[in-house]
Image: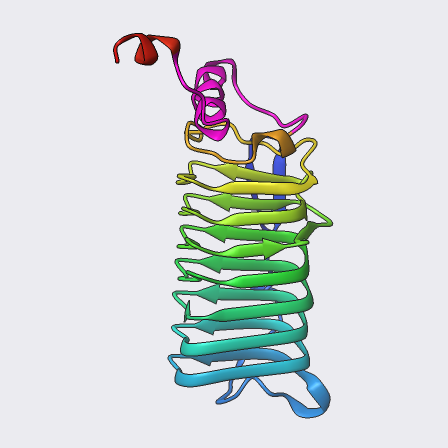
Amino acid sequence: MDTRTIRRTSVTLPALNEPGLYLSNVTSLEGGRGRLAEFHYADADLRDLDLADTHLIDGRITGLKAQRTRLEKLRVDSVEFTSCDLASLQWTDSKLSRAVFRDCKLMGATLKDVTLDNVLFDNCKIDYSTFTRLRAAGPVIFSKCTLRETTFTAADLGAALIDDCDLRLTEFDGGKYRGLDLRDNDLSQLRGLASLKQIVIDQAQKLQLAEALTADLDVTFGEDLDDK
């Protein structure tokens, strides 16, 4: 199987090029009896996308645009999302395994009680989003993504790696982050540093964390008072 590896973290990618696997073009993601397998769903432009109690297996979703997206109790196994724009995304009570989001826009998304296992976000825009009780049950990689003003609340990201991402005003509000690899990012504008115990960083990032902590604590410097 193909993998994506950054430092010590390896994500197993969807197995869509296996011999004998043929992806059929479909016009809807609602499969029979709540199951859709070996499919290619492309270039749909929807006002609303609502999926619940559905299992997506071995598929590609390409160029999907939706003005409002609601996904609930969705199981995703070995699926690629490429160049999708899912506005007002609400995704709850779901599990994703061997999934890839590549060049996708998920801005302002709300994910709640979603479990990730071998999931890659590559060059995605995820700004202004809220992730509540997001759990990395297996390796998860965010690579070259923008996560500006995104909030992780009570998340479990110990098996995750965030690499070369825009983390301006990204906030961590409670949760478990032991082992979260934050190397190769600018950490100077992170928020909620008290939650980030036992993360992995480089020596050079200590000054960035100090700058972030100064802002997080709303510190006043004595020199500024003396000048008044």
128 with respect to 51 (left or right): left
* Placement of 69 over or under 112, stated as above or below: below
Of all residues shown, which one is farthest toward the front? 228
Residue 196 or 138: which is nearer the viewer?
A: 196
Q: x, y (%) of residue 102?
A: 44, 57
Q: In x, y percent, where is residue 50?
A: 55, 83
Tell me residue 79's x, y (percent): 58, 67
Residue 202 in magenta? Answer: yes
Residue drawn at x 50%, y 52% as measured from the top left: 121
Q: Is residue 87 above or below residue 187?
A: below
The residue nearer to you, when weighing 79 against 49, is 49
Q: Residue at x 40, y 47 (%)?
A: 146
The image quarter in which residue 66 lies: bottom left
> Viewer-proximal residue, 204 or 187?
187
Q: Which residues are magenta?
A: 197-221
Residue 171 in view here:
yes
Q: Residue at x 60, y 87 (%)?
A: 30
The answer to whether residue 216 is magenta is yes
Q: Quadrant of the C terminus?
A: top left
